[in-house]
Amino acid sequence: MRLSNDLREFLELLNSRGVEYVIVGAHSLAFHGRPRYTGDLDILIRATPKNAAKIVDLLNEFGFAPSGFRESDFTELNQVIQLGRAPNRIDLLSSISGVSTDEAFASKVSAELDGIPVFILGKDALIQNKRAVGRPQDLADLDILES
């Protein structure tokens, strides 16, 4: 799956800053065998003060300084911070449905996305997440993931 320059740069910054993250959503699905179009990159961020500080610094470097993000924006659960517009939108999530943050990070798989080393949500955790979300598209994804 080819990434735009912006998405590539963002992933490289996550790695160079030592941010604790796991790619979830359609990019995780593609890694586990079901590529499909998506207009965003969903990234689960561990919601700790140390990680939040890294994210705020990263966002400032990436060009979002005028948005005024604070560390507290990234330490509460059930948060979704959307950056940019499709097809280059980045969704930073502090939790996902059906899988605890600890379970998600324990399941992570080292992979490459367009040549960039990344961490992807493990297949079993992705299945749990898709089942918990339960939208028609998620149920269709489950048919492929579980076959």
Image (spheres, helix red, strand yellow):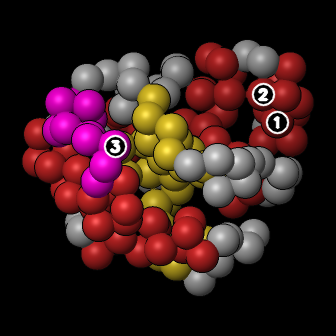
- Does residue 29 show up? no
Residue 141 circle label: 1
Q: Nearer the viewer, mark 1 or mark 3?
A: 3
The numbered mark, 1 or 3, whose residue comes first in the sequence reads: 3
* Residue denoted by label 2: 138
Residue 61's image quarter? bottom left
Residue 72 circle label: none
Rounded to the nearest whole Å, what is the CA distance between mark 1 and mark 3?
35 Å
Rounded to the nearest whole Å, what is the CA distance between mark 3 and mark 2?
32 Å
Q: Nearer the viewer, mark 3 or mark 2?
A: 3
Dot 3 lies on which element?
helix
Q: Which residues are magenta?
A: 65-75
Specify few, some or many for label 2: CA neighbours under 10 Å numbering under 14, 14-19, or 20 or more. some
Q: Is residue 37 magenta?
A: no
Q: Is residue 71 magenta?
A: yes
Q: Quadrant of the C terminus?
A: top right
The numbered mark, 3 or 2, whose residue comes first in the sequence reads: 3
Which residue lies at the image location 68% right of the left edge and 28% below the top edge?
Answer: 130
* Residue denoted by label 3: 67
Dot 2 lies on which element?
helix
User: Picture coordinates of residue 60 (x, y %)?
Assistant: 27, 59
Quick one: 146 or 25, which is closer to the camera?
Answer: 25
**Label 3 sits on what residue type?**
Ser
Specify few, some or many for label 1: CA neighbours under 10 Å numbering under 14, 14-19, or 20 or more. many
**Label 2 sits on what residue type?**
Asp
